[in-house]
Image: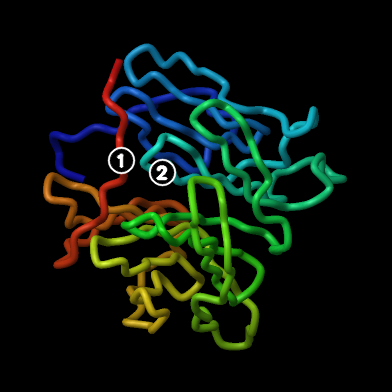
Amino acid sequence: MNKDEEISTFFEPSAHANGLMFESKDKLIACQMDGQLVSIDIETKKIAILTDKYEGTRYNAPNDIVVDKTGGIYFTDPLFRAPQPLPQNKEAVYYRSVDGKVTRIIYNLKSPNGIILSPDEKTLYVIPTMQKDMWAYTVFAPGKLGEERVFCLLTQPTGKNNSGGDGLTIDTKGNLYITSELGIQVFNPTGELLGIVKFPEQPANVTFGGLDMKTLYVTARTSLYSVEMKSTGHTFFEKKSN
């Protein structure tokens, strides 16, 4: 960190906020693991609850999100920090349409965690934490999924055979950057491993940023890292501010 930069608290209490994505320049969508999906006004810090229940029952612990070009939100709801027994009785992936309707769209994965769309939004990627298989789903329409397939298998740490991923991001060419115990595993759109970027600590989440979207920002156990890249991060659609 440069000497002229400062770290400050943006929002507190965060209700164990995890996955984040901007919906517009002044609205930040957050998964709060205490059971809800919210929109945070950047200037006033006021929150609007987008959804806190499915079929009348609170979510387990919303974890990560991706916002599509219509303003709809895909989000994962695994067991991490969730009450036991699980309020929803199962781990799942949900879709909240722009009109507020929530649909459970995936419910057969163990610990679905990271989630992102391909640049053309025709494929949804879901990253489970407790299995090496990373999944991809054909998107027919917003919130409407078709064929599922194993996208890739994560390279495993020594002595383990079913270690999964956490967060992820994607570049303009559709290459996926998946955080794992070994570092950030990079796969091309066909599921071929391009390499592993290693860090002093196990990375948890990752995103592209900077003025040219060529800086990879990586959160780890106690640190934030940045890596200058040749690739360019994909920019998701943002609604115009009110």
Q: Secondary structure at mark 1?
A: loop
State the residue lying farthest toward the right: 85
Q: Secondary structure at mark 2?
A: loop
Q: Nearer the N terminus, badge 2 or badge 1?
A: 2
Identify whether 112 is placed above or below 66. Answer: below
Side of 110 where 116 appears, left or right:
left
Quarter of the image where the C terminus is located:
top left
Res 113 quadrant in image: bottom right
Neighbour class for label 2 at 10 Å: few (<14), some, many (≥20)? many
State the residue lying farthest toward the bottom: 159
Quarter of the image where the N terminus is located:
top left
Q: Residue at x 65, y 51 (%)?
A: 105
Contact check, label 2 and label 1, Cβ < 8 Å: yes
Q: CA distance from mark 2 to mark 1?
A: 7 Å
Res 94 quadrant in image: top right
Q: Amino acid at mark 1?
A: Phe
Res 178 quadrant in image: bottom left
Q: Residue at x 49, y 57 (%)?
A: 139
Q: Amino acid at mark 2?
A: Asp
At which x and y percent is residue 176?
Answer: 37, 67
Name the residue tied to disc 1: 237
At which x and y percent is residue 81?
Answer: 70, 44
What coloring was used for the rendering? rainbow
Q: Residue at x 65, y 79 (%)?
A: 162
Identify whether 197 is placed above or below 49. Answer: below
Identify whether 189 is placed above or below 37. Answer: below
At which x and y percent is residue 192?
Answer: 38, 84
Name the residue tied to disc 2: 68
State the residue lying farthest toward the front: 140
Q: Residue at x 73, y 41 (%)?
A: 60
